């Protein structure tokens, strides 16, 4: 794991992150509601662009290493980093929406997977297991806990449900920059350093595949797909480490079926 110094945030910095997180969450939930059969992912991206502007924010993704979208929209076999385009959303699809915004210089980052209408029981299980694994990890996001234990808990939960975690893409510290130390993989060794401290802020984001864990990047240089083209799910929160219970800075209701 990374040896770079992990930022500790306090006081006003935490308040700014809380505001950025709440805004990111509100935008994510509104975008999620706009996902309907027949809509193109380009239309969803444009809707998100307008919402971000209306909230006085900037996209944290647009232009990041030349990423061309305002948000990431990834359908079915697309894991993460999908770019809005002509693809139409169909009934029975799952659509991953990842919203990262900058508000007053601070970043809020969060993601969820939207089932479009009724999805198959296996895909329902995939979505449930992925969101559960996120909350299992958040339970470990406490002052004094080891990061390796948090990371390990994600894979342990996912594998017990019969699914696999993506290894090439990971969660991260977040603050003034979208990606800060440490990396937060969705696998790890129990008890491995670094030790979590009050004031650290992590974007925890399990990416979970129904079939093989293996993924590849498409010719657009961004869109990550599963090698077997089976579905993948993604849920993410920005989380503040505290003594006692962690604080989810991007609060939203959990998925229900
Ligand atoms: Mg993230």
Image (tube, rainbow, N blue to C red):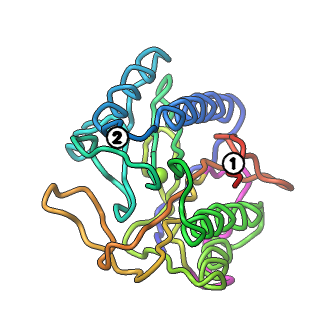
Q: Position of residue 64 (x, y in %)?
A: 28, 43
Mark 1: few/some/many CA within 10 Å (<14, 14-19, 20+): many
Furthest residue in direction left, as rendered: 219
In-front residue for pair 128/179 = 128
In-front residue for pair 166/188 = 166
Residue drawn at 62 percent across, 79 percent down: 152
Q: Specify start and end residues of the magenta stretch as a single range.
A: 188-201
Residue drawn at 54 percent across, 80 percent down: 163
Q: Which mark is residue 240?
A: 1
Residue drawn at 43 percent across, 51 percent down: 179
Say whether residue 5 is left or right of residue 220.
right
Q: What is the C-alpha distance between the residues marked 2 and 1?
A: 21 Å
Q: Is residue 41 above or below residue 26?
A: below
Q: Secondary structure at mark 1?
A: strand
CB at disc 2 and ligand 1 closer than 8 Å = no
Q: Position of residue 224 (x, y in %)?
A: 30, 63
């Amino acid at each position: 794991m990374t040896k770079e110094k992990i930022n500790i945030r306090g006081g006003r910095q935490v308040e700014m992150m809380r505001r950025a997180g709440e805004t990111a969450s509100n935008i994510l939930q509104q975008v999620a509601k706009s996902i309907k059969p027949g809509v193109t992912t380009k239309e969803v991206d444009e809707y998100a662009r307008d919402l971000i502007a209306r909230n006085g924010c900037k996209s944290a993704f647009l232009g990041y290493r030349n990423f061309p979208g305002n948000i990431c929209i990834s359908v079915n076999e697309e894991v993460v980093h999908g770019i809005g385009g002509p693809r139409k959303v169909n009934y029975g699809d799952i659509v991953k929406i990842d919203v990262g915004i900058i508000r007053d210089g601070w970043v809020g980052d969060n993601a969820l997977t939207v089932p479009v209408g009724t999805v198959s029981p296996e895909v329902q299980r995939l979505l449930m297991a992925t969101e559960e694994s996120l909350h299992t990890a958040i339970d470990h996001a406490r002052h004094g806990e080891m990061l390796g234990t948090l990371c390990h808990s994600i894979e342990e939960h996912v594998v017990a449900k019969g699914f696999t975690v993506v290894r090439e893409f990971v969660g991260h510290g977040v603050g003034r920059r979208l990606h800060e130390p440490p990396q937060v993989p969705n696998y790890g060794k129990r008890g491995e350093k670094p030790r979590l401290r009050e004031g650290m802020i992590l974007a925890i984001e399990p990416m979970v595949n129904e079939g093989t864990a293996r993924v590849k990047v498409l010719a657009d240089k961004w869109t990550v797909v599963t090698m077997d083209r089976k579905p993948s799910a993604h849920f993410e929160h920005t989380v503040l480490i505290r003594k006692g219970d962690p604080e989810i800075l991007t609060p939203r209701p959990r998925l229900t079926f």
